[in-house]
Image: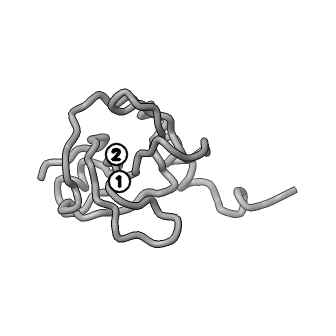
């Protein structure tokens, strides 16, 4: 299956545990194309129309609905979980997605958890 970074697929996210996003959701592929071309898994970020605004959630519009790309729920899934590819209109600040990922993974945890 051909997958590219920032493609949107309907993906079955079950089984889940705890507070993970459940059921089948549209998800954005965030893994680099170099990975997508050579392995049978992809890294995805679910999209939702519910939830609170967090720094790790990037606003988007998908199929005329406003929502968020939920970067605090990224996961690796096998390509067999990809149900349907969407060609529909997807509007998101891709730089915002990449900036949020970069910040989230490059900031030392002690800085995020320190209270003054």
Q: Residue at horizontal 40%, vertical 61%?
A: 22
Q: Is residue 39 visible?
A: no
Tell which of 29 and 85 is nearer to you: 85
What is the crowding at mark 1: few (fewer than 14 residues within 10 Å), some, or many (at least 20)?
many
Where does residue 70 sit, x and y in percent of width and height? 48, 48
Answer whether labels 2 and 1 touch (C-beta < 8 Å).
yes
Q: Is residue 52 above or below residue 78?
A: above
Q: Which residue is mark 2?
A: 28
Circle 1 SS class: strand
Q: Residue at horizontal 70%, vertical 57%?
A: 112
Circle 2 SS class: strand
Between disc 2 and disc 1, whose residue precedes?
A: 2
What is the crowding at mark 2: few (fewer than 14 residues within 10 Å), some, or many (at least 20)?
many
Q: Which residue is mark 1?
A: 44
Task: Give the side of residue 21 with respect to residue 79, left or right.
Answer: right
Q: Is residue 10 above or below residue 38?
A: above
Mark 2 to mark 1: distance in Å? Answer: 5 Å
């Amino acid at each position: 299956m051909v997958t590219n970074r920032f493609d949107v697929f309907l993906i079955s996210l079950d089984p889940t545990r705890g507070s993970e996003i459940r059921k089948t959701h549209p998800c954005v592929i965030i893994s680099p194309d170099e990975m997508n071309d050579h392995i049978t898994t992809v890294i995805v970020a679910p999209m939702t129309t519910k939830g609170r605004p967090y720094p790790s959630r990037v606003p988007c519009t998908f199929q005329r609905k406003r929502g968020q790309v939920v970067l605090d729920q990224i996961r690796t899934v096998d390509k067999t979980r990809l149900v349907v590819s969407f060609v529909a209109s997807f509007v998101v600040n891709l730089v915002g997605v990449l900036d949020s990922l970069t910040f989230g993974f490059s900031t030392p945890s002690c800085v995020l958890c320190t209270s003054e």
